[in-house]
Image: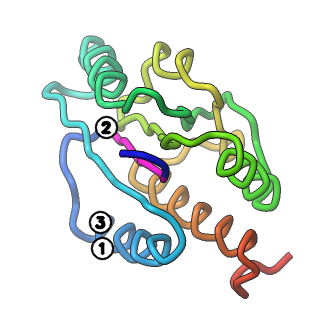
Amino acid sequence: MSRGYLVLWAARHQRRDWEDLCADYRRRIQHNASIRDQMIKVKGSSDDPGRIKAEGAALLAALPDPCWTVALDPRGKTLSSEAFARELARLEEDWPHPVAFVIGSDAGLDEEVSKAARLRLSYGPMIYGHELARLVLYEQLYRALCIRRGIKYHRR
């Protein structure tokens, strides 16, 4: 994968209703940017402390080399939609490789993945389920592209 976006997410299963919503945004994004989605599936229960480490290792192994990694992490930096659009524009100009967004499962995101990321991005102090976090990411990517391209979607 050369330029473009990759959304890597860990989960035990892929539910069709969430996938349909995400697919709609991916279709919209693809008019302006390359985007790929990849689910990482690791066996084990949410209570299994080894599962989160295994997911983290699998997520890191699935990252293209090189890539600009953004970890969705509630302890990360919060950005407005406009600031997110500016950050993506900067990367589009300065970084000729993929930008990969990494989302943990219902068990969370392994600390090693957060440490390896160049940016830790937070939606704020509230915790979102991993499926909802993925959908919000797609919506914000689409919004950022609309802001940058002057497409009437974003309102202040």
**Toward which corner of the image does residue 34 lie, by quadrant?**
bottom left
Q: Is residue 135 left or right of residue 39?
A: right
Q: Which residue carries the number 2 mark? A: 10
Task: Classify 80 as above or below 44.
Answer: below
Mark 3 element type: helix
Earlier-in-chain disc, 3 versus 2 = 2
**Residue wearing tag 1:** 20
What residue is shown at x 33% (from left), y 28% (from top)?
Answer: 59
At label 3, counting other C-alpha atoms closer than 10 Å, the crowd grade (few under 14, some 14-19, many 20 or more) is few
Check residue 8 for magenta coloring: yes
The residue sitting at the right extreme is 156
| Element carrying mark 1 | helix
| Residues under numbered marks 3 and 1 in contact, where contact means CB atoms less than 8 Å apart | yes
Frontmost residue, 23 versus 98: 98
Q: Residue furthest left?
A: 43
Q: Is residue 107 left or right of residue 30?
A: left
- How many residues crowd around disc 2 within 10 Å: few (fewer than 14), some, or many (20 or more)? many
- Give the quadrant of the N terminus: top left
Residue drawn where x is 35% and y is 55% of the image: 36
User: Can you identify the residue that label 3 sits on?
Assistant: 19
Which SS class for mark 2?
Answer: strand
